[in-house]
Structure formats: structure tokens, C-alpha cells
Amino acid sequence: MTTTVPGRTTRAAGLEPMFAPAGIAVVGASRSPGKLGAVLARSLAGFGGHLALVNGRDETMYDSVRAAAAAGPVDLALICVPAAACPAVLAEAAAAGVRAAVVCGGGFAEAGGEGVEHQRQLAKIVAETGIRLLGPNTSGFLAPHAGVTASFVPGVAEVRPGRVAVVAASGGVNHALAFLLAEAGHGLSLAAGLGNAVDVTAPDVLDHLADDADTAAVALHVESVADGPRLVASVRRLSARKPVVALVVGQHDVGAFAASHTGALATSWRTTRAALAQAGAVLVGDERELVDAVGALSVTRLRPGADPGIGVVTAQAGPGLLLLDDLRGRRARVPELVKSTQDTLATLLPPLTYQRNPVDTGRPGPELGRVLATVAADPGVDVLAGYALHEPDAVDLPSALREASGIPVVFGVGGTGPAVTATRRALLDAGIAVAADPRGVAAAVGALLADARRQAVPRSPETRDQAPVVAAGPYDEHQAKQVLGRLGVRTMPGRACANRAEAHAAFDAVGGPVAVKILDAAILHKTEIGGVHLGVAGHPELDQALDRLRGARRFLVEAMAPPGVDLVLGARRDPVFGPVLLLGLGGTTAEALADVAIRLAPVSVAEAAAMPAELAGRVLLAGWRGGPELDTAELARVAAGLGDLLVANPGLDEIEVNPLRLTHDGLVALDAVIISKEADDAHPDQ
């Protein structure tokens, strides 16, 4: 792999010297207990390799990194000095043969002013020497298997080794997630906070984790993205081997604070989430859900499947209802159990309990293990989800759950205290995903389902006809529709006209009623200037419409479309991720209502076919109240073709079909816009 730092020509070294060093130098170490260097030194007390404390003003320590490296191997330098002094220390470390460094303190690009120059100098040294740098402006990382606690946050040395890795944009979030995972009973293989990410970025760490035998699942926290294609490629490689769960910040307006936090602008939340999901990541909405999801995926996974079935068993009806409600909100399928399963349950449970799925046992008892095993054996159940309060006098939960073997299990254990913690740990050690409450169970099950569905999507590229190469433009509506016609996109019959005589001839040829529209590539929003007249039924009305378009050099006379459901389908070049495809309901209001599905282009036909199911208004596409029903294969072909067209034509910046109307006869493009890169400044919003 190669670094993304501009001007760097050397091949980037791996991250083993950073995360599994033979020796560490703490530069800026101190004997004052509250100082950063002193805290770091204490955190590293359990490190088994060469640990060198460097402070030129303390005669009991090494006076330089070079001296520390001469006394023993030093792969990693932890730099705890003021921002202005960091570039010189980093350069000295690289000259001494140190291969990795962490700059913990702030005062760089996030602070503005001189900090920007300090960060630029760090980047220059990295580019010239090849030393790997984490930060600046980070609280460090944890690598428990290697015995490295490169962090100044108290308590992190207590985090035990385990199977979950954390890659977080923020050092603070990195530690917050590490502590939440530890509280949930999970150990860590790695937890890295990227900070300002001058050198080491999320893709670097993800690539490192792809080959890490200690890591079973990865939690990814994203605030901004500098190189979208590289992040997507890294997530795609990693998710092919082990699950990745992603939390993307920025659903709401946090731009100013985000910029002050790391010196980077926030990335489009919706596009980033779509790109990561397409690359194979499981998406979550908050840090608690992230912990439950990645924790579950670190101990168990479902087989690939488009729609796995869930068996729900609860020992208390109220929490069971919360669990079921949350699962329904995640579009999880909870099938009714087959008759033979219900017959067996009837012999195990009181007649007043609900036994069809969910299964309510009432208070947990000795029969719980057999109930769990019976539901797990049902042919429609692929994953078992359950919840019970911790009542050790009533049932031994670990023993009961051991009877439900053969399929993945997620179980919530309610309660508090050391005995509850021990029970949850015993379940985790047995390969059973654990949560503390019904919402956590639903989040974990949702992650297993998303992972199974992702695995079921073919990863091999499809063979399709090459998209046409077209001129750069500019394009008016008629010309844009001609391009769409080459993709097989249907439009209404119509003619482009240059005068009244041609317009009247077009009316006779097309037959009324018609739409009369101004044709001008510089006008993107024709309705806003009175440039569209609908339902023109005769020649006198046509003359009136043409009078209102006085001054127009060209206009379109087109047959009116039948009623239907309006969609928007567009392809554009995202500044971070490149070509993207967007599908929404509601025409001009779709994006405002956030009812959109997004994919990176090119997109496979299978991926495009899945886009309508993500829309909140998808029921309108399924024959709502006698309306038209969407042929997803037709939409997928059109959508994939539109994405291919943008990818194949670098001179085009945006292609939009709005509305793309769903009628009883299929899809028809009622309006189309193609914007060329060269023409971006020549399209006033008139």
C-alpha cells in the first residue's frame, strides 16, 4: 500500500512497528505525575520490551531518541512535547531508525494559525523519511495482545485482550468505545484513535487488521473522509474476511464543530453511510448499538441469506414485546413456528403463554433449555434471540442456552452485579452473543441479519454492454432524453421545435393533450420561470402557451404522460467518493425528505434492484390503492445504465431524471438534465 500524503514517493511501511513494537521511547517523559509524559510512562509499565524514557532536562533519563535507540531497539516513539517542538523530535526519531511515532498533543490544524504549519512540517517529514505517524491530536492506541498501552487515559491498561478492534477518527471516541466494550465483556485486539490523521488513516489500519489473526470483528468510527475510494476499497477487502461495523457522524449540522475538532470538514453523512454499506460494512446509529453489533459479530455469524428467520424466546412478556417491536422496526422476519414445534412447546409451557413466535415462557424455569432447543430446531428459524432477567434460583442460563446448539444465539441477560457479569462472560465464552437489555439484543440481531444479507449479495462483477460515450454538452431536455434513449430509457413521444409551424405540426403528430416546454440548456428549473405548460389540448391553447414562451428559440412539444408515482433517479460526481447513484421518491421533495437510496457507481444490477426496498415510501411502488407496481428489474437496468454512463464519460458531472414516473406501462422519463463539467458555471438557476 502507498500513503496518501502528497509528495511522498516511498512505499509506506506496515504498521507492525507501531502496534507490535520491540521497544518504545517516551519523548517528553516526566516525573511530575500529572504531565502527559508521566501518565504515558505509567500506562506502559506492563510493556515487556525495551522502554526508554527521554527527557534532555532530566539526567535520570535518556537525553535524546538517538541515545535511547542506541541502548536497545526502539520501533515506536511516543512524542509528548509542545506542538512547535514535535517536527524536530519526529525528524530525530526517523534519523535514529525509529519506524513509527505517535504525536499525542494538540495545537495543530485543529487549532488553526501556527498549528497548520506545525502539521504541514510533520507531513513533510513523514513524506521524506517514511516513518509512520499516528496523529497528531490523538490520545493514542491500545494493543493489549502486544502489551502496549500507548495512551494517557487512566484505566486503559485494565482493558483485556480480545477479538474486537476499534478504528476511530477521534482518540476520545476510541477510548469511549474501548471502555464500553470492556463493560460489555469484550476484550480488544486493537483500539486506535486517528486524530488529525497526517499519515496513518482509517484505510491503513483496516488493511493492517485484515491480516490480524487476533481480530474477529472491527468497529469503525468515521467523522470525515479524505479519500473515499481508498476507504471503500479497504472496507471491501476487510469485510470479505471479517465483519466491519460502521458508525458515521454527521447526520445533523455539526460542520463547524467538526472542523474545529480535527481541522477537517465533515463528509456527507448519507453518502458515506451508503458507500460503506455497499463496501460490506454493517451500519449502526450510535455508539451503544455499535458495541452490541460488533460484540455479537465477534462471537457468532449467520450463514449468508437474503431473509433469515428469527426465533424469539423471552422469559418476561414486557421485555419480549420491546424486543419484538425493535426487531420489526429493523425489517426482521419473525415467522410463525411450524405446527410440530408448537405442539412440542405446548408440552413444555403453560397453556396461557404465547407459543407461536415470539415464545413467552412466563418466569424462567428448568424447561427453558428445552424451549430454546425446540425453537432453534424449527425449520424457519436461522437465529435465536432471547431475553431473561438473571434469576439463578430459577434457571441456570448458561446451561439452558447450551441446549440451543446449531444456530447463532443472541441473548439478553437483565440484572446487575458480579453474578450477572459472570453469567454474561460465561455466555460470551460459549460463543453466545450477549446484551444487557432488549434494545441491545435487537441491535445485535440486526447486525447479524445485515451481515448475512451482505454476504448473500454476489461480489463478482457483472458483464454488461459498454455505456455509450457522448459529447460533453451542453444538453437541453430533448437532447438529454435522446442520450437516455440510447440506454433504453423510455420517454413520451415528442418533437423539438424552432417555430410555431413546427409546434403545430408536432401537436398534430403527437396528438393532444401535450406538454409544451422551453428548451434551453442554461435553464435547469423550467417551471420556476413559467417555462412549462401542461395539458395543452388544442391549437388555440398551443398558441397561448407559445405566446407565454415568447423569446424562446426552441421548445419541446411532448405527449402528456399517464398518472403514476414520481421518482427521482440521478448520477453525480461526489467530491469525496466519485460517481454516485441516487434514487428517491417524491420528485423535487425526495432529498429534502431524506427518502433516498444511494450507491457508488458503477453499481451491479443486483445492488440497484435492492435500492427501492430502502425507501420509506416503498409501499407506494407496490400497487398502492390500485396504482402501478414497480418492476425492480426494469428500474435496476435503468439505474445501473445511468451509473455506467457517468463513469464512462468523465466530461459529465451530473445526470438526473426527475421525474422518472412509474406508470402501469412501466417507467417513463418526464424530464432529464445532463450537466457537463465545462458547463457548471454556465447553468444559472433561472
Image (cartoon, rainbow, N blue to C red):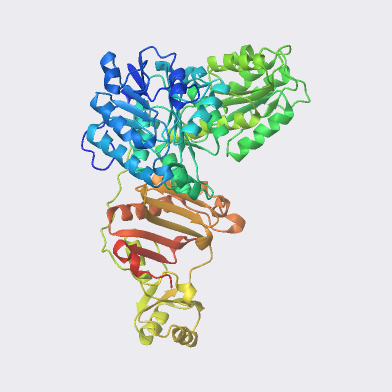
* Residue at 28% over, 59% down: 651
Q: Looking at the image, how many numbered discs can be counted on the residues? A: 0
* Residue at 46% over, 53% down: 583
Frontmost residue, 174 versus 69: 69
Establish if 428 lies above or below 618.
above
The N terminus, quarter of image:
top left
Residue 540 located left or right of residue 371: left
Frontmost residue, 284 versus 303: 284
The C terminus, quarter of image:
bottom left
On the question of residue 280 being in view, the answer is yes
Quadrant assignment, res 85: top left
Residue 5 located left or right of residue 241: left
Find residue 159 and report its horizontal and vertical position in percent. Answer: 51, 19
Frontmost residue, 63 versus 612: 63
Find residue 516 and report its horizontal and vertical position in percent. Answer: 44, 77
Find residue 324 and report its horizontal and vertical position in percent. Answer: 65, 34
On the question of residue 225 being in view, the answer is no
Q: Residue furthest left?
A: 9
* Residue at 40% over, 65% down: 672
Find residue 638 and report its horizontal and vertical position in percent. Answer: 39, 55
Residue 356 located left or right of residue 111: right
